[in-house]
Amino acid sequence: MKSTQSRNALSHVRGLGWLAMPALVAVAVLSLSAVACAPPSGSANSPKATPVTIISTPAPEPTVPEIPLEPSSTPPRPGFHLVFADEFIGSQLNTRLWTSDMPWGSTTLKEDQRYSPDAVAQSRGVLTITATPQPKADKPYRSGVITTEKSLALKYGYAESRVQIPAGAGLWSAFWLTTTVPQDHSEIDIVEVLGQEPRQAYQVLHYGFGAKKGKALHISGEPELSAGFHTFSVDWEPEHLIWYVDGVEKFRVTENVPSVPMVLIVNLAVGGKDAWSGPPSRNTEFPAELKVDYVRVYQRD
C-alpha cells in the first residue's frame, strides 16, 4: 500500500505542536547453506465560486506490503514539514490520536446511522469504517467516524488522506475539517463522495457566522473512486484554499478563507430520506466499507 513510503504513527498532537513516537518494525532473514533462521516475530456575502469539472487520470492500484513501513519524511510540497500522521499500523485504533465519535455527539438530525467504535477497525496498514444495517436499534444503520477532537486543532496546513470509497445509494464518504465554535459555520470538505455518484468528488468550503454564512462548491469528474485508492488533499493557507485529487489541483478559493482552528474528521454516513445523500436503495450492498490508507498533516516551515 505504501511501498514507496515509510510508515509512522505520530503521537498525541495538540494545537499546532507535535510529539513524535517513531515505530520500527524489523524483519531479518539469514540463510547459510543448510541452516535457516526464522525472522523475529500507518467576507461573507462574496459570490460563490463557479463549479468547473476536470477529469483526472486514475490512480494506480495499491499493493499491501507484507511488512508495514514508516512514513516518508518527504512533504508533498516544498517548504512543509510533517506535524501529524497515522499510518494505521497494528490492530488497534490509536485512541491518543482519534476519537470514535463526532465532536457534537453521534446523533445526527437527517442521517440514518449511529456512529459506533465497533464500526472502526484496522489491519495490515489500512483502517476500515464499516456501515451495516441494525434494524432493531434507534437508528437503522451503524457506521463509524474518527476525529482529532482531543489531539489536533489545525489552523492552516496541508491535510491529506488516501482512501477508497464504497459505492451504493445512500452512502456518504467524507474527509473534512470543521470548527467546534458555536454559530461558526466554517468547514472545509476536502472531499465528499456520494455512493450513487462514485465518479464525482465534491470539494466544498462553508464559511460565515449565523445568517452571514456562505458556500463555495466544486465538483470534479474522476475515475471510478470505489475501484481503488485515491489521494485527497487540501492546502489551507491565510490567502487561499487549494484542493487536490491524486496530486492534481481541482479547485482554488481566495476569498472567505477560514482563520479558526479545526478538527479533522473521516466518516462514512448513511443517509435518510431527508439527507443530502438520500436513503440506501435495495441495491445498496452492506456491509459497506470506507478504507483509509493513511492520514497526514503538514505545516509550513
Image (cartoon, helix red, strand yellow):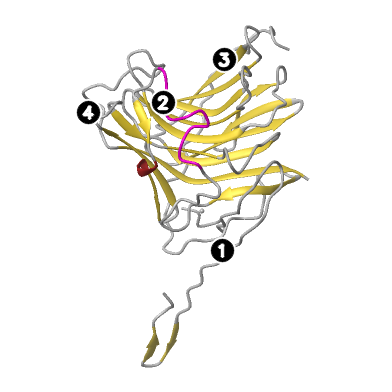
Q: Which residues are magenta?
A: 99-109
Q: Nearer the viewer, residue 197 or 149?
A: 149
Q: Residue at x 67, y 33 (%)?
A: 235
Q: From the top left corner, tell me how far across and down residue 271 is, in percent.
A: 36, 22
Q: Amino acid at mark 1?
A: Ala
Q: Secondary structure at mark 2?
A: loop
Mark on residue 135? 4
Q: Nearer the viewer, mark 4 or mark 3?
A: 4
State yes or no: discs 2 and 4 in contact (Cβ < 8 Å).
no
Q: Nearer the viewer, residue 114 or 33?
A: 114
Counting residues from the start of the chain, the first of labels 3 and 2 encountered is 3
How crowded is the residue under tag 1: few (<14 C-alpha within 10 Å), some, or many (20+)? some
Q: Which residue is mark 1?
A: 23
Q: Residue at x 48, y 78 (%)?
A: 28
Q: Nearer the viewer, mark 2 or mark 1?
A: 2
How much space separates mark 2 and mark 4, taking CA atoms?
A: 16 Å
Q: Which residue is mark 2?
A: 107
Quarter of the view holding residue 256: top right
How much space separates mark 4 and mark 3, taking CA atoms?
A: 39 Å
The stretch drawn in magenta includes residue 106: yes
How crowded is the residue under tag 2: few (<14 C-alpha within 10 Å), some, or many (20+)? some
Q: Nearer the viewer, residue 252 or 296?
A: 296
Q: Amino acid at mark 2?
A: Thr
- Identify the main secondary structure in magenta: loop
Q: Nearer the viewer, mark 3 or mark 1?
A: 1
